[in-house]
Amino acid sequence: MSYYETVDVRVIPRSSRAEVAGMISGRVKIKLTSAPVDDKANEELVDFLSDILNKQKSYIQIIRGAKSRDKTLKILCFEDDELAPLGL
């Protein structure tokens, strides 16, 4: 059985490395190395989450906040514990 999970994140661009850095204001804090220019940070966000969650990139969508640090993602899940690497 598959279902969609929404996840609120706060992106911190131009960091020294890409990592999940805990929670901030009820959102998952994710540090990225890319600058927020020409959608590079959004692309890196989807690539990074795809790697740590072992999901295809097409399973992860930014549904709100494409031009903001605060974003809402829609992630296709198949099991309850798939978002554990995000601390959820």
Image (tube, grey):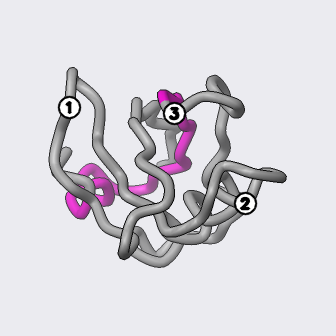
Q: CA distance from mark 3 to mark 2?
A: 13 Å
Q: CA distance from mark 3 to mark 1?
A: 12 Å
Q: Is residue 67 left or right of residue 2?
A: right
Judge whether 56 appears above or below 73 on screen. Answer: below
Q: Earlier in the sequence, mark 1 or mark 2?
A: 1
Crowd around label 3: few <14 · some 14–19 · many ≥20 (10 Å): some
Does the segment drawn in magenta span residue 84? yes
Q: Find the magenta span and give its range.
A: 70-85
Contact, mark 3 vs mark 2 (Cβ under 8 Å):
no
Contact, mark 1 vs mark 2 (Cβ under 8 Å):
no
Q: Quadrant of residue 9?
A: top left
What is the secondary structure assignment of the residue under circle 1?
strand
Tag 3 residue: 69
Identity, as a three-letter code, of the amino acid under mark 2: Lys
Residue at image coords 29%, 30%: 27
Q: Quadrant of residue 8?
A: top left
Residue at image coords 53%, 46%: 75
Rendered location of residue 3, percent (x, y): 50, 40
Q: Earlier in the sequence, mark 3 or mark 1?
A: 1
Rendered location of residue 1, percent (x, y): 47, 49
If the image is split into quadrants, where does the C terminus sit?
A: top left
Closer-to-camera residue (60/76): 60
